[in-house]
C-alpha cells in the first residue's frame, strides 16, 4: 500500500525511535536481571523444544473456507458500500484518558518493570460495562510497515461480551466488537465501535460473530481473529466496513434496513481457516485452541504467530507460525497449497497460562526470540513476560519482592509496532482496564 508522505513519516519515526531508545536505557537500569541459569526454583519454563516432525506439526494445519464473493458483494451493495477506516474514525465519539486521567486502580494494573512509556484508559462509560472485556490488540503498524493507514495511526482493540453471572445465556453473550482508535495524535486518542458479523442468506442478512477475540492481527487489508472458543480463525476485509442505518437492539436485517444492536458499523467475515483435525478441545485433543496471535515482520515472508490455550492440566504450550502469502491477489491472507495452510515453524514451551505471544528476530541474530506473556497462578498478582529460545528462558525480577510478577495485570495479546519499536498490550480486569506500550528494547534489556 502506498501512502503520501511516507518518507516524511519515516523521518519522524526515526526521531521517535531515538527518543524511545533513550527511554529504554533508563528503564533497563531500573530492572533487576535474571537468566535461566539463575532461576532455580523460579518457575522458569526453560528452552523451547522444536516440533520437527510432520506428525507433530500436522495438528496445526488449517483449511481455508472463503465466503462466496457474490454474497459479500450483495451485502456491501445492500448496505450502501464501504465506509472505510477513515469513516469510522471520523465519527469517533469516545475519548481515551491518558495515564494522568486514569484512576489509581487502572494505573496499578500497568507493568512494574519495565514501565510503560505510554498508557491510556477507556471512556468511563465503557469502563463501567463489566460484561464486556478487552482481550486483544493490533495496530496500523501491523497493517503497513510505515505505521499508517492512510493519514492515520490506528490501534484496534478486540472486546468480547463475557456475562458469566447470568443464569441463562444472554442475547449478547459471546458477541465480538472492535474499538477503532485514532492514535494519530498521541495526546488525544478517540475511538468508535465496530461489531463483527457473518453474512447469511446469500448476503441479504447477517448475524453476530461470537468469539472471545483472544488474538487479532491486522495485516495489509485483512483482519484475522481467533474464532469461537479458539477453534480456527476468521478473516475480515477492511475494505468492507459497512454502516447500519437502523438503530435498534436487533442484529441483522430489520424493517427499514439493517441494525447492529445499537452500533453504527459492522465488519462482515470474508474468509475462515478451520482446523484440519476438527474442532479443538481443551480435554487433551491434538488440535490446538488458539489463545493468542501476533505479526512477525522480521521473518521472511511476514508471518502470523500463534499460541494455544492448552488442555486442562497440561504444563506445555505450543507456539508456532504460518507464513503470509506473497501473491498479489491474496493480500493479507495466509500462504496456502490448494486451500491448505501448514505451520512453517513450531515449538513446545513449558510456560503455562500464556496470554500473549510475540516472535522477533533481532538484526544479526541466528533465529527468532519468542516473548510469552504469562498469567500468574494468583489472579490478583501481576503477570510475567518471558523470552524463550531453544537455549533457555529469561525474565526480569521485580526489585520490590524479587518475583517475576512485573508485567501488567491480566494482560491480553501482544502486538509489536515495528516502526516505533513498541510492544502494545492491554489489561482486562474490570475497573483496571488500560491500553499501554513498552519499547521492545526495554523489555529485552530487562532480561539480559
Image (spheres, rainbow, N blue to C red):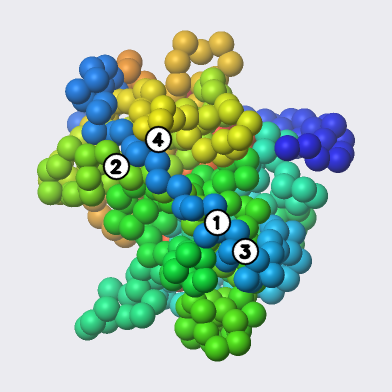
Residue at the spot 47% in from the left edge and 11% down from the top edge: 366
Mark 4 Cα within 10 Å, few/some/many (few <14, many 20+)? few
Please name the residue that numbered disc 4 is placed on. Answer: 339
Front of the two marks 4 and 2 = 4
Please name the residue that numbered disc 1 is placed on. Answer: 70
Between disc 1 and disc 4, whose residue precedes?
A: 1
Name the spot of residue 132 as percent of width and height, x first: 43, 71
Front position in the image: 204 or 313: 204
Q: Find the distance from the CA under tag 4 to the CA under tag 2.
A: 12 Å
Front position in the image: 441 or 416: 416
Q: Looking at the rendering, which quadrant does residue 329 occupy?
A: top right
Please name the residue that numbered disc 3 is placed on. Answer: 76
Secondary structure of the residue carrying numbered label 3: helix
Q: Find the distance from the CA under tag 4 to the CA under tag 3.
A: 25 Å
Between disc 4 and disc 2, whose residue precedes?
A: 2
Front position in the image: 312 or 280: 280
Amino acid at each position: 500500500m502506498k501512502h503520501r508522505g511516507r518518507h516524511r513519516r519515516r523521518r519522524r519515526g526515526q526521531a521517535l525511535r531515538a527518543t524511545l531508545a533513550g527511554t529504554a536505557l533508563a528503564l533497563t537500569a531500573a530492572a533487576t536481571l535474571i537468566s535461566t541459569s539463575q532461576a532455580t526454583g523460579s518457575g522458569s519454563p526453560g528452552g523451547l523444544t522444536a516440533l520437527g516432525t510432520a506428525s507433530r506439526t500436522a495438528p496445526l494445519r488449517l483449511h481455508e473456507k472463503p465466503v462466496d464473493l457474490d454474497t459479500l458483494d450483495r451485502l456491501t451493495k445492500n448496505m450502501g458500500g464501504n465506509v472505510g477506516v477513515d469513516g469510522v474514525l471520523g465519527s469517533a465519539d469516545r475519548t481515551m484518558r491518558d495515564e494522568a486521567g486514569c484512576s489509581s486502580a487502572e494505573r496499578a494494573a500497568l507493568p512494574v518493570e519495565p514501565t510503560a512509556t505510554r498508557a491510556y484508559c477507556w471512556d468511563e462509560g465503557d469502563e463501567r460495562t463489566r460484561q464486556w472485556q478487552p482481550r486483544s490488540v493490533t495496530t496500523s503498524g501491523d497493517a503497513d510497515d510505515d505505521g499508517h493507514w492512510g493519514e492515520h495511526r490506528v490501534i484496534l482493540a478486540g472486546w468480547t461480551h463475557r456475562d458469566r453471572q447470568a443464569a441463562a445465556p444472554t442475547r449478547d453473550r459471546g458477541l465480538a466488537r472492535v474499538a477503532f482508535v485514532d492514535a494519530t495524535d498521541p495526546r488525544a486518542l478517540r475511538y468508535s465501535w465496530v461489531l463483527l458479523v457473518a453474512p447469511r442468506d446469500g448476503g441479504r442478512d447477517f448475524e453476530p460473530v461470537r468469539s472471545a477475540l483472544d488474538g487479532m492481527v491486522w495485516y495489509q487489508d485483512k483482519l484475522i481473529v481467533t474464532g469461537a472458543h479458539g477453534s480456527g480463525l476468521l478473516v475480515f476485509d477492511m475494505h468492507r466496513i459497512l454502516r447500519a442505518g437502523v438503530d435498534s437492539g436487533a442484529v441483522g436485517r430489520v424493517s427499514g434496513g439493517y441494525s447492529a444492536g445499537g452500533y453504527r458499523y459492522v465488519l462482515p467475515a470474508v474468509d475462515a481457516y478451520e482446523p484440519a483435525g476438527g474442532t479443538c478441545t481443551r480435554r487433551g485433543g491434538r488440535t490446538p485452541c488458539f489463545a493468542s496471535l501476533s505479526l512477525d515482520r522480521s521473518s521472511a515472508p511476514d508471518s502470523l504467530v500463534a499460541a494455544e490455550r492448552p488442555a486442562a492440566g497440561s504444563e506445555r504450550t505450543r507456539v508456532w507460525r504460518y507464513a503470509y502469502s506473497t501473491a498479489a491477489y491474496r493480500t493479507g491472507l495466509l500462504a496456502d497449497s490448494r486451500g491448505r495452510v501448514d505451520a512453517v515453524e513450531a515449538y513446545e514451551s513449558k510456560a503455562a497460562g500464556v496470554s500473549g505471544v510475540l516472535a522477533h528476530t533481532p538484526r544479526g541474530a541466528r533465529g527468532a526470540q519468542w516473548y510469552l506473556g504469562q498469567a500468574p497462578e494468583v489472579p490478583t498478582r501481576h503477570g510475567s513476560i518471558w523470552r524463550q529460545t531453544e537455549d533457555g528462558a529469561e525474565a526480569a525480577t521485580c526489585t520490590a519482592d524479587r518475583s517475576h510478577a512485573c508485567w501488567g495485570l491480566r494482560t491480553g495479546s501482544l502486538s509489536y509496532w515495528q516502526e516505533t519499536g513498541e510492544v502494545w498490550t492491554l489489561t482486562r480486569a474490570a475497573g483496571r482496564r488500560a491500553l499501554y506500550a513498552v519499547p521492545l528494547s526495554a523489555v529485552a534489556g530487562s532480561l539480559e
